Image: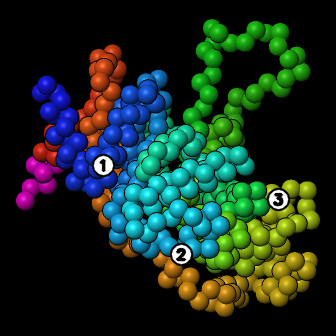
Amino acid sequence: PSATANMKDKADRATTEQVLDPRTRIILLKMVGRGLLYEVNGCVSTGKEANVYHAVTPERKHLALKIYKTSILVFKDRDRYVSGEFRFRKGYSRHNPRKMVRVWAEKEMRNLKRLQTAGILCPEPIEVRENVLVMGFIGDSEGWASPRLKDADIPDSEFPRLYCELLLTTRKLFHDCRLVHADLSEYNILYHIEPKQTPPSESDAPPQNTEPNQTPSEPNTPAQDESEQGHLYIIDVSQSVEHDHPHAFDFLRADLRNVEDFFARRGVRTLGLRRAFEFVTRERLESDTPAAALERWLAQADDDDGEGDGEGEGEGEGEKAGGAAVDEDAVFMRSYIPRTLNEVFDPERDVGVLSAGAGAQLIYKDTIGIVAPKADDARPAERRVQFADEKDEEESGSEGS
Ligand code: ADP
Ligand code: MG
């Protein structure tokens, strides 16, 4: 009985975050009951529209729960994504926040499925119930979330490769998923290094007689080992729009502007906004693969930079050399999308890391107090639930007043 009271108390406290209203708690408890979840841990992220929690399955698999906030104010400014979407002609009620939020969660789920089907790296979509989206957890085996591209500690030499990866992903998103992300930036991309498949230990190494002509792995090339390379995982696709949405191109330009700016700041010789836009949208690329085409386009951009002769292959009609590219991009933005800079303004960026600090990525910062009823003492101590109130005391104590 006292445990129950304690849990209720914790849940009530969590409710002050305005995510876990009673109905949401019931949804989570049902998931626990069905054996989808074993326990729900602390926040990975608190956002304007949703919080993301870490959870584990009974098999101790890590999950991420994105729980959309159900307060009405938050979703008012989302209309611009919805109006013009064929998918939302019906059933989008501005007057019922729970319904609205449900639409967003379901949309994110469907979009994630499209990404997954196209082979784009993203969290695995698992299930959606009203305002709760259950997805695969992008992080390490201990349950630490992978950093956002913005925060990731990445060697400079990796940025050109990641830039290419992201442009190719955006192109795939556009042509294969028929989507424009519409909030693409270093904030909505996780840099994740897939944990190396634990190699079988010496003793249970495969028998000698397999594949006689298999090239032996080279022992001294750890840096070239592709399995240790980080990759970019696309997240936060609830506002992504169909490629034929009336504002799709505006959103795409703003997305690419973020990409171009970010990688240019990291010293990458990028295509420039205009060419990046062409690269993503153009139906045919006159190369065997998009990757090969991108390599060619980048080499071309380099030539233009170096020699300043401005003679392209006819692909960048009107493309100017070197320093002109930046001005040209600015003109391109202004001439096509006068409203975009305001529209795609990301409050997260200015309010800046609000509660962030280093602690924001910590998944056990606090807990919402939902745990499977059968307490399993065998699980490791760090997997046991921390009590939100205990944590609170610690924090308020250390902060002083
Ligand atoms: P918001 O709408 O609040 O921006 P996001 O989908 O971008 O929601 O998620 C917020 C943060 O939560 C991300 O920046 C990331 O740090 C973390 N996050 C989201 N999804 C996952 C996931 N599947 N695995 C690990 N961390 C995640
Ligand atoms: Mg986000």
* N-term-proximal mark, 2 vs 3: 2
Three-letter residue code for mark 1: Leu
Q: Please, which colouring scheme is shown?
A: rainbow
Three-letter residue code for mark 2: Arg
Secondary element under disc 3, as helix, strand or loop, is helix
Above or below, 216 relative to 349: above
Task: Tell me the tag on residue 96.
Answer: none
Residue 331 visible in the displayed image: no
**On the rendered structure, is 375 left or right of 64?**
left
Residue at coordinates 87% horizontally, 77% vertically from top-left? Answer: 315
Q: Which numbered disc, 3 or 1, marks the residue closer to the eye?
A: 1
**On the rendered structure, is 212 left or right of 373?**
right
Three-letter residue code for mark 3: Pro
The residue lying toward the viewer, choosing from 157 and 72, is 72
- Give the quarter of the image for residue 373: top left
Secondary element under disc 1, as helix, strand or loop, is loop
Above or below, 332 relative to 112: below
Residue at coordinates 69% horizontally, 40% vertically from top-left? Answer: 226
Residue 249 location, x and y as percent? 68, 76
SS majority, magenta? helix
Task: Tell me the tag on residue 80.
Answer: 2
Task: Tell me the tag on residue 20.
Answer: 1
Query: In this view, which residue lies farthest toward the front?
Result: 90
Residue 109 visible in the displayed image: yes
Bin the neighbour count of mark 3 within 10 Å (Cα to Cα): few under 14, some 14-19, many 20 and up.
Answer: some
Query: In this view, which residue lies farthest toward the left?
Result: 401
* N-term-proximal mark, 1 vs 2: 1
Q: From the image, which quarter does the N terminus lie in?
A: top left
Task: Tell me the tag on residue 290.
Answer: 3
Magenta segment:
395-401
